[in-house]
Image (cartoon, rainbow, N blue to C red):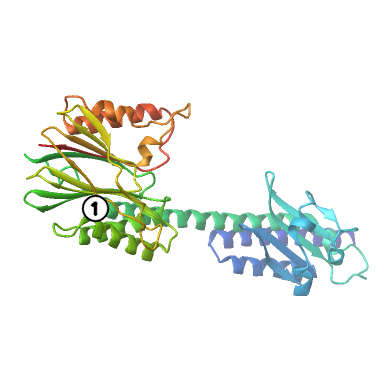
Amino acid sequence: MARKASLHRLQFCNFKLDFLLNVTLAINENLPIEELLNRFVNILREDLNIGKLVLYNYNEKWEVLIYDGVPKKVVDDFSVENDLLYYKQITNLTTTLNNNLGQFDVIIPIYHKDRPLAYLIIGDIDEERVGVSPTIKHLHFIQTLANIMVVAIENKRLYNQNLHQKVLHKELELASKMQSMLIPTHASLPNNDQIETAAYYLPHFEVGGDYYDIVKLNDHSYGFCVADVSGKGISAALLMSNFQANLRALLTEKTSLKDVVIKLNERVMKNANGEKFITLFIGRYNAEDHRLEYINAGHNPPIFFEPSAYQISYLKVGCTGVGMFDELPTIQVGEVYTTPGSRLLLYTDGMVELENENQVEFGTGIMEHELVQKQSIEDIVDKTIEQLDQHKGAGKYDDDVTLFGFEFY
């Protein structure tokens, strides 16, 4: 009799090992989670005589992965937060806070370090069974099997999450390349006997919500703009790309700046539904009469240096940002005249609001200082950015950075 019992135990141990091997192979074959869970239920129900089971798993929120041998209404009555998180180790459910838990025998928490991944609740369907309950008899094997299953599911989730992140990163890389095509390159910026220009652009993420542009309208006239979308990320970048297309379509030598801004406001309102707005500075320069007209639509005021009077001023005349109101309350057009050597710096708030380790903002002082030095506009831009980087120190840029400089002749 003893030999027969030993043989039976040996056979059952071999069965457990074979099953664990089969489960491991199934996981390695990357079978769907549903197939793994079906095998798990079958082994507990058919081979181990576990009549009731519920498996909860955490994936951004607690959810029921499987339930067997119990009505759905019983499962719906459970709350992991209220009924299960209390249990930190395998526990016999002799007394419970939730009466429906009393239908089960054992709860098996499955943790990774201090973080709960899952809860398996099991019980016999035959409460009057004579002898050792299969729930108790096979408890450690069930725990091992449950741990293998839950870890496999968690690994699949992390793999899919990582795959999704890689796909998203590729899409962002493509979006970044496409957006960079909308930003003028150094070679495309006008540098001639009428004006010289230089620019610096650094998006905070792969794609940005800042924008600058310059368009030659005729042989002696240029239109230009610097803009900044409220908020960050892909939605801001998409809105800015749409803004760029509209600006290029609207900005002509004959259309007034006021009409351009009115149209831009209408289109931003339509595209953003009032959820985002854009601040911008738009200007048009005529190299024949040296007249610079502009509208500052809620943007950081550019710095204008007039060398003949050795005077710095800020160009503030304009209106509110576009996309804030269905109709802009008032719009004023500003005007300045240049003399040879006049300079202009346009920038976004990512520059002036950048704080150092002492929470001191970069401000405009360094830009004013560099603007009056006897150096090229390219050197002014480069040296300003160098000092911005020094100001940042070991910190990080927390917004897009744009600097756009002009020198007029």
Name which quarter of the figure residue 25 lies in. bottom right
- Picture layout, residue 366 above or below residue 256: above
Q: Nearer the viewer, residue 35 or 401?
A: 401
Q: Is residue 170 visible?
A: no
Q: Amino acid at mark 1?
A: Met
Please identify the quadrant where the N terminus is shown: bottom right
Q: Is residue 34 visible?
A: yes
Name which quarter of the figure residue 390 lies in. top left
Name which quarter of the figure residue 42 lies in. bottom right
Q: Nearer the viewer, residue 241 or 16?
A: 241
Q: How many marks?
A: 1
Q: Position of residue 112 (x, y in %)?
A: 66, 47
- Picture layout, residue 11 above or below residue 91: below
Q: Nearer the viewer, residue 281 or 27?
A: 281
State the SS at label 1. loop
Q: Position of residue 391 (x, y in %)?
A: 38, 27
Mark 1 crowdedness (10 Å alpha carbons): few <14, some 14-19, many ≥20? few
- Picture layout, residue 188 above or below residue 40: above
| Residue 286 as seen in the image, left or right of residue 158 | left
| Residue 11 as seen in the image, left or right of residue 318 | right
Q: Residue at x 90, y 58 (%)?
A: 95
| Residue 311 as seen in the image, left or right of residue 145 | left
Q: Give the residue number, with chain letter if any, for mark 1.
A: 181
Q: Position of residue 184 (x, y in %)?
A: 21, 48
Q: Position of residue 108 (x, y in %)?
A: 77, 55
Please identify the quadrant where the C terminus is shown: top left
